[in-house]
């Protein structure tokens, strides 16, 4: 097999650095052409030197004068701002783009990658939550590979099957660090407590989304788009052991599940190796040492973000965009200790109520609705 030429967007984050681990293990198979990051210039420069990347981009314009940039070879190009990040998807010598940006900021890069005929390895679930109606028509089974562990699991369960013979998707969920808590107790938790996720070591935004179960809600909408199913065909189930990464149930009663250790390098690597499988840097599973497996209904009365996301997914159109924007603003406020965890779903509910939804028409329309929803969420949080 020829060496694949890879761009990593969000190279300094949790998914990005684990993708670099995969590349370290397979230097004969993966060549990293370009990296994008937001603000962590020192790390990005170090990675660019280690992997011999010829192109770098930083989302934050203010990084332009960073001293670490002087360590780069003269033939390395460096760009700044969102357009420079998106431009990496259009480089000539690229096969695959791994989109591991965080939040709606990643949507345009997903769109541009597929539009340019490149393979998209997608970790940035917000891309599909917000822009799925516009992105999916550009994708095929071979050009959009999910990186989210649940969606990678479902994708693999579908391999060799007729999708119309599937009855439902069982989307597993760790339950987050606050499983079993009451609404009152939830309103008292701090950002530091919420950042201690029981299973995965992830970036701050997705960690808070996991604590509120908004992450699972985003994943339901992501699965709707990826696998062309309705919310009614997706059942969320809390599975605290995080051993079953998701399942697909077929009309004859057969169920295919994807199991393994909880290590994101497995789905990241699968998105790069597909249709092959490579040796993995992850630990090997030992089923004799596994805790008994539990499967429990989620508590959507307490974890209202999941109920709101199911509502948005059911409605479709621009409502998921509205919901996502309000959530991003409220999560950032919670991380700044400017609101309570329970203010996140309260804010999202009010913004969804006020904004409503309409049919999706264009990326520009979504960006405009995203901006208005953010402004409204900020106003609601300020007024308390
Ligand atoms: N972490 C996981 O285990 C996991 C699992 C499944 C799905 N996902 C999804 O993968 C995506 C990334 O998650 P993560 O946990 O890796 O997040 P993260 O650790 O916060 O990393 C985000 C990355 O994006 C960069 N970035 C943020 N805003 C940017 C911008 N405007 N322009 C350019 N770069 C920007 C950050 O750069 P700097 O840090 O340099 O500022 C960082 O490299 C999310 O959509 C998440 O839902 C993550």
Image (cartoon, grey):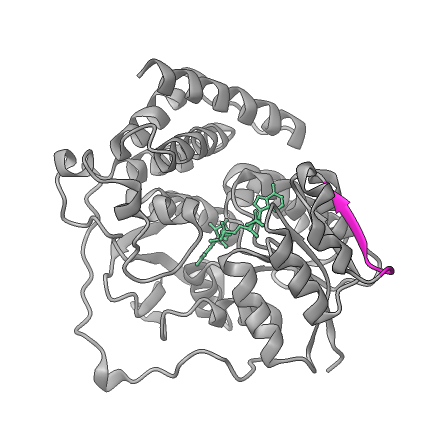
Residue 191 position within the rendered picture, expressed as x and y whole percent measured from the top left: 30, 41
Nearer to us in this view, 250 or 338:
338
Question: Looking at the image, which residue sits at the far top?
Answer: 383
Say which residue appears at 38% left-offset and 83% top-offset.
284
Q: Is residue 78 magenta?
A: yes
Lateral position of residue 111 relative to residue 218, left or right: right
Say which residue appears at 19% left-offset and 38% top-offset.
186
Residue 76 position within the rendered picture, expressed as x and y whole percent measured from the top left: 82, 59
Tell me: residue 60, above or below residue 36: above
Q: Is residue 275 visible?
A: no
Say which residue appears at 29% left-offset and 52% top-offset.
236
Magenta region: 74-80
Nearer to us in this view, 189 or 42:
42
Nearer to us in this view, 92 or 160:
92
* Quadrant of the rendered image containing residue 239: bottom left
Lateral position of residue 308 relative to residue 179, left or right: right
Residue 117 position within the rendered picture, expressed as x and y whole percent measured from the top left: 76, 55
Lateral position of residue 231 relative to residue 271, left or right: left
Tell me: residue 214, above or below residue 120: above
Q: Is residue 73 visible?
A: yes
Q: Quadrant of the C terminus?
A: top left
Say which residue appears at 29% left-offset and 28% top-offset.
343
Q: How many marks?
A: 0
């Amino acid at each position: 097999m020829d060496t694949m030429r890879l761009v990593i967007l969000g190279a300094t984050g949790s998914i990005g650095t684990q993708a670099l681990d995969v590349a370290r293990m397979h230097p004969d198979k993966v060549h990293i052409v370009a990296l994008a990051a937001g603000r962590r210039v020192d790390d990005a420069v170090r990675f660019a030197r280690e992997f011999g990347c010829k192109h770098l981009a930083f989302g934050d314009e203010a990084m332009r004068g960073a001293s670490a940039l002087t360590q780069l070879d003269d033939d390395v190009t460096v760009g700044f701002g969102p357009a420079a990040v998106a431009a990496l998807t259009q480089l000539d010598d690229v096969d695959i783009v791994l989109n591991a940006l965080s939040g709606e900021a990643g949507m345009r890069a997903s769109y541009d990658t597929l539009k340019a005929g490149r393979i998209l390895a997608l970790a940035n679930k917000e891309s599909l939550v917000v822009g799925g109606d516009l992105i999916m028509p550009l994708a095929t089974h071979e050009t959009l590979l999910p990186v989210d562990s649940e969606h990678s699991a479902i994708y693999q369960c579908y391999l060799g099957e007729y999708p119309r013979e599937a009855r439902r998707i069982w989307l597993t969920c760790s339950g987050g660090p606050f499983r079993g808590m009451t609404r009152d107790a939830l309103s008292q938790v701090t950002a530091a407590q919420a950042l201690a996720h029981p299973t995965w070591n992830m970036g701050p935004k997705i960690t808070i989304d996991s604590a509120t179960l908004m992450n699972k809600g985003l994943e339901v909408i992501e699965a709707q788009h990826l696998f062309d199913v309705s919310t009614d065909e997706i059942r969320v189930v809390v599975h605290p052991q995080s051993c079953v990464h998701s399942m697909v149930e077929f009309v004859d009663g057969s169920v295919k599940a994807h199991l393994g250790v909880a290590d994101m390098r497995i789905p990241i690597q699968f998105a790069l190796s597909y249709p092959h499988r490579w040796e993995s840097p992850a630990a090997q599973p030992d089923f004799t040492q596994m805790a008994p497996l539990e499967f429990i209904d989620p508590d959507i009365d307490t974890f209202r973000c999941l109920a709101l996301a199911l509502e948005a997914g059911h409605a479709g159109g621009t409502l998921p965009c509205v919901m996502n924007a309000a959530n991003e603003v409220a999560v950032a406020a919670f991380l700044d200790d400017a609101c309570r965890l329970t203010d996140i779903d309260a804010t999202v509910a009010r913004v969804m109520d006020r904004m409503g939804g309409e049919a999706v028409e264009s990326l520009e329309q979504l960006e405009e609705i995203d901006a208005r929803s953010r402004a409204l969420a900020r106003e609601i949080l300020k007024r308390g």
